Image (tube, rainbow, N blue to C red):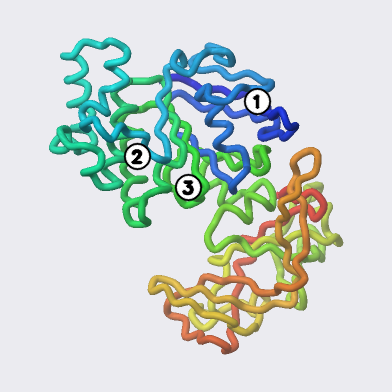
Amino acid sequence: MAEVKLEGINKVYPNGFQATHDLSIDIADGEFLVLVGPSGCGKSTALRMVAGLEDISSGTLSIDGRVVNDVEPKDRDIAMVFQNYALYPHMSVADNIGFALKLAKVSKAEITERVNKAAAILDLTEQLDRKPGQLSGGQRQRVAMGRAIVRQPKAFLMDEPLSNLDAKLRVAMRAEIAGLQRDLGVTTLYVTHDQVEAMTMGDRVAVLNKGYLMQVDSPQDLYDHPANVFVAGFIGSPSMNLMEGTLGGSPASPTVTIGSVTVNVPAFDDGTKLANAIGSKVVVGLRPEDMEDASTVDGPDPARTFSTEARLVESLGSEIIVHFGLDAEPYIVTDALDDEGDAALSSDHDTATYVARVSPRSPVKNGASIDLVIDSARFHFFDIASGDTLK
């Protein structure tokens, strides 16, 4: 096991394209850290730099306290699990798992012992004599994991290892990988574009966009306390509703107005960013689950209730997703970033539909009116210029 530390890592390609910008992350000994973000955000490039498959333009990368910028991949004592498994089709499962040990000239007895131990952990004992072509996708991924385990490396690097699996198997495998990592206690850097995968597997999650680190935090803190509008809109499904609003009232009795709806919100402390923003336009964020159908609430507060039309109702059994109209200007996060990596904002004038996640007891129907109650303590507020949180 080892700590992996990225300090001010930059990657600039010969054509001038910069894939990462001053990327700094400390991955603690035994930690499971997930890099997540949209396609092209730099997460796979960062992983490949840690693996030694990409050169580092500037910055320092250390593994177990040793700077490894110029160390060959084979000498970094890491094991990588790829998206496409990278198994040898002509070899048995046992030979695939033990191949790296054979190259390292480990004795046959020790190879057999380590392979059998890894197979037992991964429930592959009965498949050791089979070829990869005779295995299911999940079993092949286990073989790839076994090949990494037997090396007993200081760190695991995993590049979207579940993306080739079907949805049901992906759910099962992510639980297996997370449990295996906890049992082995090996420092792990895991890359995915799937935010649900990131949130369910990582001890901490690092969100990247256009090569910039947006936020690194525990999954729950990312969800509850997004640092900016990009993280707010990226983490969560359905995503957070983001709209233009105005803070009013006073720090002791503030309000927020979104379109024609004005709602009382909890008091702000004097001198805070929120208190200083009173009287100004802000970006207001509200997660779908922080609204409820008033007909299912005992004594709904009229000061936190508004009427709207249910444009689309999706019943999922355990919950109902309601797409509703509101005359508040919606905001979307553009792909553009300013020179410091702040998320730029762009109003979307063609869309004024938002999403609420309500109780399955709601009687709401497509095209019907609905009264929604807002949990006003759950509002998120962001600076309209930079996109950074005001909380």
Q: Which residue type carries mark 1? A: Ile
Residue 277, which numbered label?
A: none
Q: Could you tell me residue 269's position as x and y percent?
A: 75, 51
What residue lies at 25% left-to-right and 47% top-to-bottom? 136
Q: Tag 1's secondary structure?
A: strand
Q: How many marks?
A: 3
Identify the amino acid type marked 3: Met
The numbered mark at residue 9 is: 1
Give the answer, above or below, for where 230 lies relative to 362: above
Residue 55, percent from left and from top: 61, 22
Residue position marked by numbered label 3 in the rendering: 199
Task: Please state the horizontal and vertical placement of residue 152, each as a whole percent of the image.
Answer: 33, 20
Q: Is residue 359 above or below residue 29?
A: below
Q: Are marks 3 and 1 in contact (CB under 8 Å)?
A: no
Whole-number angstrom distance, CA of label 3 to CA of label 1: 24 Å
Q: Residue furthest right?
A: 279
Label 3 secondary element: helix
Assign the N terminus to one quadrant of the image: top left
